[in-house]
Every structure is written in C-alpha cells, then in structure tokens.
Amino acid sequence: MNAELLFIYDSHCPWSYAATALINEINHHLPEIKIHYWHNAIFSAAQYGSETKIPVAQVDAVEQECKLTFSNEYRDKLTLAKDSTLAANLLAWANHKAADKTLPLLNALQQAHFQHGVELTNIEQIQAIINELKLSPPAKALKTDKLSKDVEFDLHEIFEMQEIINTKAIPALLLVNGDNLTLLNHNLYLSAPNAIIEAIEIELANA
C-alpha cells in the first residue's frame, strides 16, 4: 500500500483537536499509511497580523458533536486571543525532521492547551513536553514571533492543495492513493473516531 494521508489543521483549533482523534485511530490501525501533518497556522499572529479568539459557541458545538470535554481552565481563557506561532514552528519541524514524534507531540500540546488551559505561546510552557518526548528542536522551531521556513514550506503546499480541493476549511483529511485524491468527510466520524478506519479501507479497495 502506497497510501498517504494529509492532515491540515491548527493546534489551537477546537475542531482540529477533535479530528486528531481520527488521526490517532488511523495511525494505530493503519500504520502503513504515511501521515503528513500540515499546520495551517490560522491562529498565528505572525502569519495574519492579529490574534484570533475562539467563540464559546464553537467550543460548545465541538463538545456536543464530538463527545469531547474542554476543561474549565481552557474555557476561562476563551476571552484571550490565541496565537499558534510557536506550536506551528515546533510541529512543522517535527513533521520534517522527527516524523515519528509528530503525533505524540501534537497530542501532548493539545492536551496541555485544551485540558489544562496552557496557551503554548512561550518556551517555558512547552519545555516539559519537549523533555518528555526527548526532542532537541533547533532555535528556529522555538520562535514565537515569526513562522519558520518549515511552516512556510508547508503553507505553500497547503495553499496549493486548497486550490485543488476548493476549500480552505480546516481541519481537512485527504487520502492520497496513487493518482487518487479523496477529501474524507471527517465530520461523519467525529463522534465515533474508529469508524473512519472502515471508510478508508473501502476507499482504498475501490481505488
């Protein structure tokens, strides 16, 4: 099987947090599928010039549809603007240089952010995660005020792909199998993440 999966997301996006559960299932049950993690940096002040707040209604919708629970620590900080610049740099570096650590890193960062209310905007807030995963990121991966070349490269790939699929919505899961590209309807599986495995197997069998 030469199938690959493109995961377009933002670490600070609640819907992306829900979709990571699907990625965990795919990684566990279909390890032969190579997963590319493309951080879209839509909450990066360095990218867009201003930070963005998360509406309470969006968090409520994710909880209701995906059977997730966001902590009070996270909800109490919804009045603060979000900035995913540091997380984008670190995750893009991992995607390019430490691929096997990218998903554990993403899970750990999202757990810290959505369950413990950690904003992930300075090195001190992520140092324990880096140490636990035994990562050695370079200085470029720890910038808080500028997106790295790794992120810019991934954004170029994302923008080209979004032109092809005709949507800029995230998260997005795209299954690549040879010359076939399928935009998976991840919304169907957010409440039961393991169901996406059968869906992917059907897509691959019909390719």
Image (cartoon, rainbow, N blue to C red):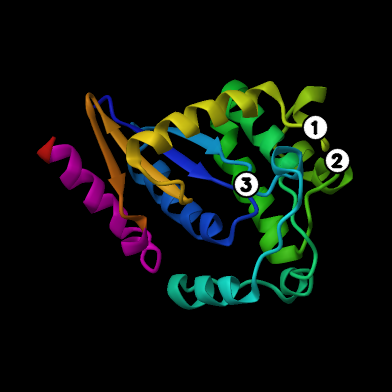
Q: Are marks 1 and 2 in contact (CB under 8 Å)?
A: yes
Compare marks 1 and 3 and give the one earlier in the sequence: 3
What's the distance in space between the residues labelled 1 and 3, CA to CA?
18 Å
Relative image position of residue 83 (x, y in whole percent): 75, 50
Q: Determine which residue is flagged by label 1.
A: 142
Secondary structure mostly seen in the magenta stretch: helix
* 12, 110: nearer the viewer: 12
Magenta part of the protein: which range?
A: 187-205
Mark nearer the viewer, 3 or 2: 3
Quadrant of res 17: bottom right
How many C-alpha atoms fall within 10 Å of the one at disc 1: few (<14), some, or many (≥20)?
many
Quarter of the picture holding the N terminus: top left
Relative image position of residue 31 (x, y in whole percent): 37, 36
Q: Are marks 3 and 2 in contact (CB under 8 Å)?
A: no
Relative image position of residue 54 (x, y in whole percent): 66, 65
Quadrant of res 163: top left
* 93, 30: nearer the viewer: 93
Q: Is 171 placed left or right of 113 in the picture?
A: left
Vertical arrangement, residue 11 with respect to residue 102, above or below: below
Q: Determine which residue is flagged by label 2.
A: 123
The three-letter code of the residue at mark 1 reads Leu
